[in-house]
Every structure is written in C-alpha cells, then in structure tokens.
Amino acid sequence: MLKDAETLRALCALDGASGREDAVREFVRERLPADVAVTVDALGNLIAEKRGRARAAKKVALFAHMDEVALLVTHITDDGFLRFAPVGGIESAALFGKAVRLESGKAGVIGGKAVHHLEKAARETLPKTDALCIDVGARTRGEAETAARLGDNAYFDSEFTSFGDGFLKAKALDDRVGVWMLLSLLQKELPFDLTACFTVQEEIGTRGAAAAAFAVQPDFALVLECTTAADLAGVPADRQVCALGRGPVVTFMDRGTVYDRGLVRLAFARAKALGLPCQTKTRVAGGNDAAAVHKAGRGVRTLAVSVPCRYLHSPACVIRESDVVHTQALIEDLAEQLCHAAAL
C-alpha cells in the first residue's frame, strides 16, 4: 500500500542517535529536489523551503525529527563489558537480551545478572538500566576497546519487516516515518509554499526544534510524529491511548503542549470531509517537538498529527501502512488549508 516503502526501509536502517543525525540528514539532503532551498543550522537541523505555484497567505512549517533513541557507552569494565546510558527514553524492559550494533560495526548483546543469581525480591522486578551491560564477546578491557570507545553509540540491531495485514516492524520508525512523509511531500509540485524542518535532538528534549522554530518563525506549525499505541491484549479500552488501523492521531494535549483548539477542530473537520479515519489520544501522555515549537518567538499555532505505533522506543516499533497513507493525506490537505487560512 505504501508508495516507495524502500525509502522508508533505508531511513530506518540508518543510525542517528540524538546529536548524531549526520547520516539521516545527508540521506534527506541527497533526495531533495533541485527546487528546494536548503540550510543547515549549527545544531544540525535541516531546513528546506519549497516554493509552490502561488504565494501563501500564511507561513506554514512542518516538523519531523531525524534522531532515534540509542545507547551511549559510558564505561568499559576490566572484564570486557560495556556500561551504557540511554539516549532518550528507553524502558529497561525493552533492553534485556536485545541485539545491538556499535558504531564500529561490531555486534553486541545487552545482558545482566542471570535470574538464578538474583535475590528473591529482585526476581520480581525489572532490572534497572544501570544493572545491564553490553556483551561484545570480549574477555578484557583491551579486547572490548576494539569494539567501542567511550562516547560511542550503540543501536538496536533490527530488520525492517512487513507482516500480517499491512503491518511494518523496524527500529527508529519514531520518527523516520515522519521524515519519510515530509520528504515525500517535498517531491511533489505543490500549490503552496512550504517550509520543512528536519530536526535534531528531539528524543532528549526537543532541542533542535527550538532553534529551527526560532529561525523559521512560522504562523502555523504541523508536527509529524509517531505516538504510543497500546491496543494490546488485556489493556482496557480507556488505557490504550490510540490504536493501529484507526488513522492519524490528532492530539488535544500531551505532557508538553496544549494544542491549538482551532487547528484540532480543523483537522477533524478536514478528515471527515476527505473520508479519512481519524482519532485522538485517550490519555494525556508523551510529547514531541511541538513542546518547543509552540513557544518560539511570539508563539506559534501548533498541531501534532501522528502515526500510531506499538512498542515505541524499542527494536520492534510496529505501525500499519494504512495509517501512514491516511496521515499523509491529512497532512498535505492541512498544509494547503493553513497556507490560505487568512481568517482562521
């Protein structure tokens, strides 16, 4: 169902921890059309401006972050194990026993003390991140140093896979699917002017978006994201947040932003007019680049439109192709509506 799914596959395969988004940025830059003006700021945000067939009454900027959650090597033990810190919000439950790939290209496995060596009380709780380490098959510090240096990143080693009825699994779908949607939009001949911000360091505090929004100073901002879906066995409906297969997620409020009510209402109205499924979050949870964007300069009217995603910040993020298609359609329509929304 997705057009050019191979580009999404390639984006997810790239490594780009917060502050280390270089490969993703170059991938995007190389695929932008010649009529797109590109600047890269000191933090590494890529800002792309494309002129449409007509000038816009309002400046609209779309945001998608290039970085992904990862691990940072902080210590190498004498017996050859790597201690690490998470880069972004990663639950320890998503780590134990998982395969990783280091910057050097060497493989590793996240491990810790075996359950039969734990005290009884410890067996009933999840291991904390600082109790885990990366096993690189080394026996000494010197051997381990051939695999990694302090400050190196480690990434989930996970294949991009399609399965079931239009489901996709990969690392880094948060937010490479947003990057992919924004890149796809810029490939088109547009009836309106558009500014696209491919941002850095979202996973550690929306840092790149703050600089990009300050530079661009849009009238309206649309943030393209993945958001947590918990439509799983045993989870009550009121705690599922959102669900795969029900279309784009338009959020009223999360932990970082109270979204512009007029834009929220417009999004639902346009989805209905276009015959697109659309949903909202049933819990106030998470956050994204909007937390920084809406506070930029004198303030920016901001909306987040997200693809629902199971198992966020794990080696196996799962999305559904139909949700991506419907999110793309809604975002493109909203961008055009806002460019001409002199009275909104």
Image (cartoon, helix red, strand yellow):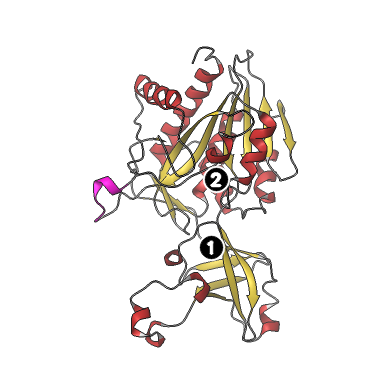
Is residue 239 within the magenta segment?
Answer: yes
Q: Which sits in the foreground, 176 or 205?
A: 205
The residue at 65%/66% (across/down) is: 105
Residue type at mark 1 is Asp
User: Is 31 covered by the magenta stretch?
Assistant: no
Q: Secondary structure at mark 2?
A: helix
Q: Nearer the viewer, residue 295 or 344?
A: 295
Q: Find disc 1 in the rendering and name its residue.
A: 157
Magenta-tinted stretch: 234-240
Q: Which mark is residue 176?
A: 2
The x, y position of residue 116, in whole percent, is 37, 86
Look at the numbered disc 1 and give the secondary structure of its residue: loop
The first of marks 1 and 2 along the sequence is: 1
Q: Quadrant of residue 294?
A: top right
Q: Residue 287 in the image: x percent, y percent?
A: 48, 45
Task: Evaluate whether residue 203 shows in this view.
Answer: yes
